[in-house]
Amino acid sequence: MTALLQPPTQTTPPATRPAARKRRSFRALEPTGWGVAVRWIWLSLAGILSFFPFYAMVVLSLKPGMLVELPGSLLPWNDISFEAYEQVLAGQNILVWLFNTLVYSLVSVVAVLFLSALAGYAFAKKRFRGKEVMFWSFLAMVMVPFHVTLIPTFILMANLGGIDTYWGLILPTLANAQAVFLMRQFIQGLPDELFEAARIDGAGEFRIVLRIVLPLCKPILATLGIFVFLWHWNDFLWPLIIAKSNSMFTLTVGISSLQQQDVPLSTMLAGSVVALLPIFLAYLIAQRYVQEGVTGTGIKG
C-alpha cells in the first residue's frame, strides 16, 4: 500500500536522451579559452599574410619614381602621389584593355550560365538514352589539361577566322564542365512536382527553364557567375595566343606587355590595382549568394 502511495519517480523521456547526448558531445567539441585564443592568432596571421601583397601593391603604386626600400617604402604616409594612375589612364591603352576584358568576362559569364543551366536541367530532370554515359564523358573533360587542347583549338579558330576577334576569344571557353556539374547537382535537389505542374499547365521545356529553373537557381548562379568571371578576368594564356594586335589585348596581357616597354614599377602596379577593382566589386555585389550556393551544391544530389 505504501508503495502505491509514493509519487512516481521522474525519468528522462527516451525521446530526449539522444538530444541530451548530442548536446553533451557538442559541448565536448567546443574549444577552451586557450583554444579560441590560438585559433584567432593563427587566423589573424593568415589574414595578414594574405592581405600584405595587396597592401604592398597599392602603397607602392602611390609612390612613383622612388626606390623600393623596406620597410620605408611600405609606409603609407610618405610621399603619396597619384601620378602613376594618371599615366596608366592617360598614356597607356588601359581603357581599351579594360573594355576588352569586360566584354570577354561578362559575355562569357552570361553564356556559360545559360548553357550550363540548360545542360544541368537536362542531366538532372530529363530521361533519355545514354544520359549517364554522356554526363560522365563530358565531366571527364575536367581531367584533360587545357594546354593539351590549346594547339587544336587555335588551329580550329584560325581556320574559322577567329584570330584577333571577340568571338574567337570567347567561343572556346563556353563549354565549362565544372559549371554543368554544379548546376546538375543543384537542380537535382529541386522537387519534381514543380516541373510536373508546369507541364500540366502547358509550359514547354524552354519556358520551364526560364520561369522555374533560373529563378530557383539564383544562389548557385551567383556563385558560378563569380567563379566564371574570375576565371575569364584573370585568364592570360588564351588571350595571349588569340590576340595579335594591341587593341585586342586583355588587362592581363596588356599589363604583362608593359614589362617590355621599360615602364616604371609604380605604373605597372597601378594597372594591377585598376584590374583588381572590378573583381573586388563583383564579389561585394554577390557575396551573400556565394556561401549559400556552395553549401547547397555540396549537400544536394
Image (cartoon, helix red, strand yellow):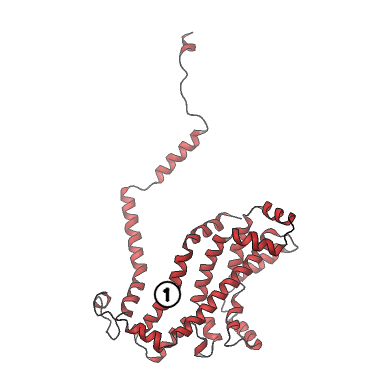
Q: Position of residue 171 (x, y in %)?
A: 61, 79
Question: Dot 1 lies on which element?
Answer: helix
Task: Please name whichever residue, 110 or 45, is drawn nearer the observer in this view of the structure.
Answer: 110
Q: Position of residue 101 (x, y in %)?
A: 50, 79
* Amino acid, disc 1: Leu
- Residue at horizontal 58%, vertical 86%? 165
Q: Quadrant of the C terminus?
A: bottom right
The residue at 39%/85% (across/down) is 88
The residue at the point 46 percent across, 16 percent down is: 7
Q: Is residue 117 left or right of residue 100?
A: right
Q: Is residue 200 left or right of residue 248?
A: right
Q: Quadrant of residue 139?
A: bottom right
Residue at (56, 64) in percent of width and height: 221
Other residues around mark 1 within 10 Å, as few (<14) / some (14–19) / many (≥20): some
Q: Position of residue 23 (x, y in %)?
A: 44, 40
Q: Which residue is mark 1?
A: 276
Image quadrant assignment for residue 201: bottom right
- Left or right, 1 with reference to 183: left
